[in-house]
């Protein structure tokens, strides 16, 4: 039973990464009409950013949690200003190809300097150790990751669905021309949205650094799983992305316990099943 | 949505004549390679990738569907051909047929699944499916996991052509490539190809004209996947191995890059693109991961400034369709 709970916890942690990443993909897709293939590379940059802050600047985990998303977010906004914005009006496919190229560049540069092996990142002192919950032993850091991700996801949902800024954002997604006519600077909103999505990816990177080690290719395979998550959940709804992300993480964790051979493939198999039964994805909007 | 390619030029008899002349020139150039002292292994490898890129181009350039998992057809055909040749001891021609049949079967299944969604979702689904297959091949016993199938025998084709001789192998691969290329050319210029192009340009209108667009896209997917499998089966004889790299997503990315560099939706573009990218890898092999960085930069440059690709730019300059 212990092992089952442990795998469930691993599933929840992976689920929080899926949720944070697919949330960012959905936000970016809504505004820019681009599937951000560089999302995995930017997630990796978040983890490396935390690593550099600690080892070069002596800046601890808590500040990294704030600074890394901002730094990588700014990097993302520069990408958007210098490259992505020129794709407006072109076929969707070019956005995918361009961001794939960016991902190759970023991952290649990091691989050159850091190889393919992992760099350690220590768990901060305050979150070391574990708690005995009676039915299982819960490492504090892992519990923290799940709860903190959930809070960030819900805060993002609140920001987009319930605030005035979010209302502008949703309006600009529906009809950018009309929103511009109201005097709102839509291009700047697009840049900020990309920064927000990228920041979420970087945040997931910082959270994962103490668990998964910091590797140049840590995001490369993850992003493909997240794509499958996005296909299952659809990108129409923010809450849909969050729930699908966590749910698929848990299902993956359960598979690791009951049938470990399929743990790598279960998300893809579920994607196939969802496509066969309900081709529009679970949240139901046609692309 | 703007069109992927610039083919406002009408397909006239003159265009057909240009293309046939260029095809003959290309065939003669390639046929003379063994007499020039160019390393034949390099050209054979490039030919296999050129055929793969042409098959991929059939789907994106004429159907508007960007498959990000085309390596799965090449890899699957490679594994099945390799297994048939090495373990079952089949002759080369049957080994190739096994590979093609495997890719055909795979494209029926993956096509049925992925055609259900459009545009960007289609790309993500094909990528996810190829990753699924990658993990299956990683664990399946007949693929030998990380080692791959090594030392695949080349044998005698039809009992007479000794494929272990480089020159004989070269011409067999060349004939295979040219046959595949002509088949794709024929498909593009058939009524089926015309319908496919109309779907790419305006799917709702094609539907309103009574075409069942899903069936056309499915058939294009199966044709493309099967031809990609043919390329993979030929590659087995050149490389004499079948490994996980051939199914990996980075290989699918390379195919996309080749086609993009050469020119999406051009007939000769994928061939040129394949030779450019393979040559680049050959010369830059000593630079390690910088090759990845360079490939990424080419993607970025092509998308931002050079969307027509090499052949597309030339065709645009001369106002011809190539």
Image: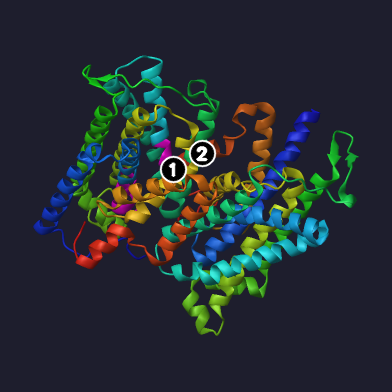
Q: On the image, numbered disc 1 is attached to which residue?
A: B69
Q: Nearer the viewer, residue B185 or A156?
A: B185
Q: Chain of mark 1?
A: B
Q: Quadrant of residue B232?
A: top left
N-terminal of the pair, mark 2 or mark 1, is 1
Does the magenta portion include B17?
no
Q: Residues within 10 Å of mark 2 (few under 14, many from 20)?
A: many
Q: Chain of mark 2?
A: B
Residue at 84% across, 41% down: A139
Name the dominant secondary structure of the magenta segment.
Answer: helix
Q: Position of residue A116 (x, y in %)?
A: 63, 43
Residue at 21% across, 34% down: B175
Q: Position of residue B130 (x, y in %)?
A: 47, 39
Q: Which residues are magenta?
A: B55-73
- Which residue extends farthest front? B37
Per the image, label 1 sits on a secondary structure element best described as loop
Q: Position of residue B313 (x, y in %)?
A: 29, 63
Q: Are the two marked residues, 2 and 1, in contact with CB atoms closer than 8 angstroms?
A: yes
User: Is any part of residue B249 visible from this angle?
Assistant: yes
């Amino acid at each position: 039973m212990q092992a089952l709970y442990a795998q469930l916890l691993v599933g929840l942690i992976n689920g929080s990464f899926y949720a944070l990443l697919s949330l960012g993909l959905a936000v970016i897709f809504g505004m820019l009409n681009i599937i951000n293939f560089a999302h995995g590379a930017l997630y990796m940059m978040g983890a490396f950013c935390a690593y550099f802050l600690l080892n070069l600047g002596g800046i601890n985990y808590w500040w990294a949690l704030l600074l890394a998303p901002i730094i990588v977010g700014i990097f993302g906004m520069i990408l958007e200003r210098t490259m992505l914005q020129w794709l407006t009006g072109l076929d969707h496919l070019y956005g995918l190809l361009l961001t794939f190229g960016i991902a190759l560049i970023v991952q290649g540069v990091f691989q050159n300097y850091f190889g393919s092996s992992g760099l350690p990142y220590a768990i901060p002192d305050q979150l070391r150790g574990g708690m005995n919950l009676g039915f299982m032993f819960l490492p504090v850091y892992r519990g923290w990751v799940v709860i903190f991700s959930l809070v960030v996801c819900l805060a993002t949902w609140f920001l987009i669905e319930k605030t005035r800024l979010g209302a502008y954002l949703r309006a600009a997604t529906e009809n950018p021309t009309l929103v511009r006519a109201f005097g709102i600077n839509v291009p700047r909103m697009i840049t900020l949205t990309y920064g927000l999505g990228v920041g979420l990816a970087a945040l997931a990177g910082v959270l994962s650094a103490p668990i998964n080690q910091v590797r140049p290719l840590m995001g490369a395979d993850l992003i493909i799983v997240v794509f499958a998550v996005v296909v299952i959940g659809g990108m129409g709804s923010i809450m849909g992305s969050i729930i699908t992300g966590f749910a698929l993480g848990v299902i993956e964790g359960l598979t690791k316990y009951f049938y470990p051979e399929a743990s790598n493939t279960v998300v893809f198999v579920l994607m196939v099943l969802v496509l066969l039964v309900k081709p529009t994805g679970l949240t139901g909007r046609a692309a | 949505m703007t069109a992927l390619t610039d083919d406002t030029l009408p397909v006239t008899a003159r265009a057909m004549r240009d293309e046939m002349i260029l095809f003959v020139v290309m065939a003669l150039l390639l046929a003379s390679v063994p007499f020039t002292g160019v390393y034949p292994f390099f050209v054979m490898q490039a030919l296999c990738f050129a055929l793969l890129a042409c098959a991929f181009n059939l789907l994106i350039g004429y159907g508007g569907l960007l498959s990000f998992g085309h390596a799965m057809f090449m890899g699957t055909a490679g594994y099945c051909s390799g297994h048939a040749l090495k373990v079952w001891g089949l002759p080369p021609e049957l080994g190739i047929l096994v590979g093609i049949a495997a890719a055909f079967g795979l494209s029926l299944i993956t096509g049925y699944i992925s055609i259900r969604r459009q545009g960007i979702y289609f790309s993500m689904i094909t990528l996810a499916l190829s990753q699924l297959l990658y993990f299956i091949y990683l664990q399946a016993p007949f693929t030998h996991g990380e080692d791959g199938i090594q030392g695949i025998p080349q044998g005698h084709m039809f009992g007479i052509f000794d494929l272990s001789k480089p020159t004989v192998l070269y011409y067999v691969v060349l004939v295979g490539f040219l046959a595949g290329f002509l088949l794709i050319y024929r498909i593009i210029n058939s009524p089926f190809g015309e319908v496919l192009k109309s779907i790419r340009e305006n799917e709702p209108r094609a539907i309103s004209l009574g075409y069942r667009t899903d069936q056309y896209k499915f058939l294009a997917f199966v044709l493309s996947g099967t031809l990609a499998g043919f390329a993979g089966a030929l590659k087995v004889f050149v490389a004499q191995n079948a490994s996980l790299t051939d199914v990996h997503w980075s290989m699918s990315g390379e195919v996309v890059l080749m086609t993009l560099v050469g020119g999406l939706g051009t007939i000769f573009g994928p061939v040129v693109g394949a030779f450019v990218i393979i040559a680049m890898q050959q010369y830059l092999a000593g630079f390690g991961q910088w090759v990845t960085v360079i490939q990424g930069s080419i993607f970025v440059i092509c998308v931002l400034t050079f969307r027509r690709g090499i052949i597309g730019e030339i065709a645009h300059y001369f106002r011809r369709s190539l």
